[in-house]
Image (tube, rainbow, N blue to C red):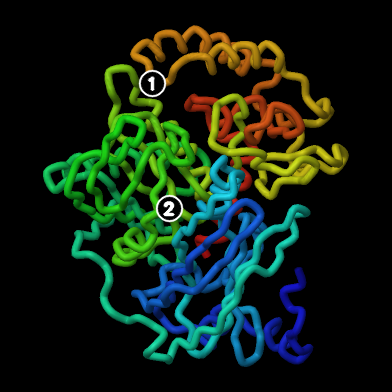
């Protein structure tokens, strides 16, 4: 879309000759505007309606990179100055709703409503908020807009909403406006569990910053925690008829997947998170079933306890893998594990995720600049043998007592394929990605976004993460 479609030429010249900091000062105050909406619909149908507008604390984000240039996310929100129609802020993001639309419930015509939030610097005067979504051709199309007057006391809620939970920094490298600010929250931790939360937060933060490229760019981050106390330990596990009263409402069995952990209590989450500066939220869940989740520019979830069948390193894998989704906009490169989705990616359409391609134009693959010279496209990698092993693994009951024992020899055989020294470190186009065995391709043989392992991010994922750090830490 043409983001300057109705801006007069004189205003475009003015924008070009004005620094980003001057634009910020001209259009925004020091505070944060939080806009809650309801996202309602079913398969092929959606409606967004305005819920409530809030004034929150100091704006923690960049005052330089106000306009999104990354082209990531299923959705894009744009903030215009209502008087001049100048675009003054934008960000790409994805939602629980767009994932829900691919589930069996949505295919059956059931409707669902989900609370969502967009945040941006608090404007000085009236703005137009527009939300767009990619169509089947990946072009952003209008879904919703509204006018918000920040000086209307009947429209903007200024009451203190943050709960009185302690805000504790665990890594500070500079002012929030100049750093990527990660906020770690806990769900299912009672007050008696709070020392465990503190240890978990330090542990997972250390794991992330021991992983490249985060390790090399550690000084570009701040990490904050809010010590959120729940009434009960653990979170909901619906398929076991286990229900817990927790502060953030996280639950397993999202979209029917035993391991997928999300919460739809968006307003409670945002009320609590608003007490600290944040760009990205991670939620640690105080439970022991393998699981987690991550949605671009929404949040990450990770389990933090291991039962007698599990291994501690798997939690570390989940935390970094899911952060790759929510922070880097990376897609899942695996394709053999079950999910609650149906046709998540449109056939014959290039995905927006930077690490997945439909290979519609092999001569101009999206990561062409990172290709290993002379590599075959598509790249052969022993896929048939790997798929045979994965078919055997899928037959196993993940919740059975002997699951891990039976799974290990299959994983070991698969690891040998993925450790092929002739392909290690090379960038090509390896078929099998994005939950699809055929028609989608990943950049490398193995990566943190592909296998259940502590493999590093491949070069394409690494480049995408670095690009995100550069964008937010300015």
The quadrant holding residue 151 is bottom left
CA distance for labels 1 and 2: 41 Å
Q: Residue at x 48, y 68 (%)?
A: 37
Count all numbered tags in the image, as a single digit. 2
Q: Is residue 403 left or right of residue 168?
A: right
| Few, some or many residues within 10 Å of mark 1 (<14, 14–19, 20+) | few
| In front of the other: 126 or 183 | 126
Residue 468 in sight: no
* Image: 38 above or below 465: below
* Image: 38 above or below 208: below
Residue of label 1 = 399
Mark nearest the camera among 1 and 2 is: 1
Q: Secondary structure at mark 1?
A: loop
Q: Is residue 310 left or right of residue 110?
A: left
| Few, some or many residues within 10 Å of mark 2 (<14, 14–19, 20+) | some
Residue 463 in sight: yes
Q: Secondary structure at mark 2?
A: helix
Residue of label 2 = 219
Q: Residue at x 31, y 50 (%)?
A: 249
The quadrant holding residue 85 is bottom right
* Image: 297 above or below 442: below
């Amino acid at each position: 879309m043409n983001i300057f479609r109705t801006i007069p030429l004189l205003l475009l010249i003015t924008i070009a000759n004005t620094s980003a900091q001057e634009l910020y000062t001209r259009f925004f105050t020091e505070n944060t505007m939080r806009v809650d909406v309801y996202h309602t619909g079913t398969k092929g149908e959606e409606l967004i309606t305005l819920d409530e507008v809030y004034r929150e604390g100091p704006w923690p984000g960049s005052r330089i990179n106000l306009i999104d240039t990354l082209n990531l996310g299923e959705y894009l929100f744009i903030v215009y100055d209502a008087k001049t129609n100048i675009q003054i802020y934008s960000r790409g993001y994805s939602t629980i709703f767009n994932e829900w639309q691919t589930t069996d419930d949505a295919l059956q015509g059931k409707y669902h409503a989900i609370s969502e939030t967009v945040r941006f610097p608090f404007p000085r005067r009236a703005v137009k908020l527009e939300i767009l979504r990619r169509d089947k051709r990946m072009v952003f199309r209008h879904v919703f807009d509204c006018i918000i007057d920040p000086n209307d006391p009947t429209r903007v809620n200024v009451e203190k909403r943050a709960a009185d939970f302690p805000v504790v920094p665990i890594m500070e490298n500079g002012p929030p406006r100049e750093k990527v600010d990660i906020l770690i929250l806990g769900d299912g931790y009672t007050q008696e569990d709070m020392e465990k939360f503190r240890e978990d937060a330090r542990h997972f933060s250390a794991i992330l910053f021991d992983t490249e490229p985060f390790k090399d760019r550690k000084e570009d981050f701040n990490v904050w925690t809010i010590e959120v106390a729940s009434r009960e330990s653990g979170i909901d596990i619906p398929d076991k008829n286990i229900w817990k009263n927790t502060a953030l409402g996280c639950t397993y069995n999202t979209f029917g997947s035993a391991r997928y952990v999300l919460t739809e209590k968006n307003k409670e989450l945002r009320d609590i998170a608003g007490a600290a500066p944040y760009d990205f939220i991670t939620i640690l869940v105080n439970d022991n079933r393998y699981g987690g989740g991550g949605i671009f520019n929404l949040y990450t979830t990770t389990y933090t306890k291991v039962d007698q069948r599990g291994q501690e390193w798997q939690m570390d894998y989940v935390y970094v893998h899911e952060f790759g989704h929510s922070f880097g906009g990376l897609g899942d490169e695996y394709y053999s594990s079950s999910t609650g989705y149906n046709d998540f990616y449109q056939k014959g359409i290039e995905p927006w995720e930077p690490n997945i391609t439909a290979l519609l134009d092999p001569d101009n693959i999206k990561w062409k600049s990172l290709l290993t010279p002379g590599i075959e496209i598509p790249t052969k990698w022993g896929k048939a043998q790997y798929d045979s092993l994965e078919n055997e693994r899928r037959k196993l009951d993940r919740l059975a007592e002997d699951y891990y024992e039976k799974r290990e020899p299959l994983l070991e055989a698969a690891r040998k394929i993925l450790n092929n020294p002739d392909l290690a470190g090379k960038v090509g186009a390896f078929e099998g990605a994005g939950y699809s065995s055929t028609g989608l391709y990943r950049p490398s043989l193995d990566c943190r976004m592909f296998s259940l392992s502590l493999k590093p991010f491949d070069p394409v994922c690494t480049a995408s993460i670095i690009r995100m750090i550069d964008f937010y830490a300015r």
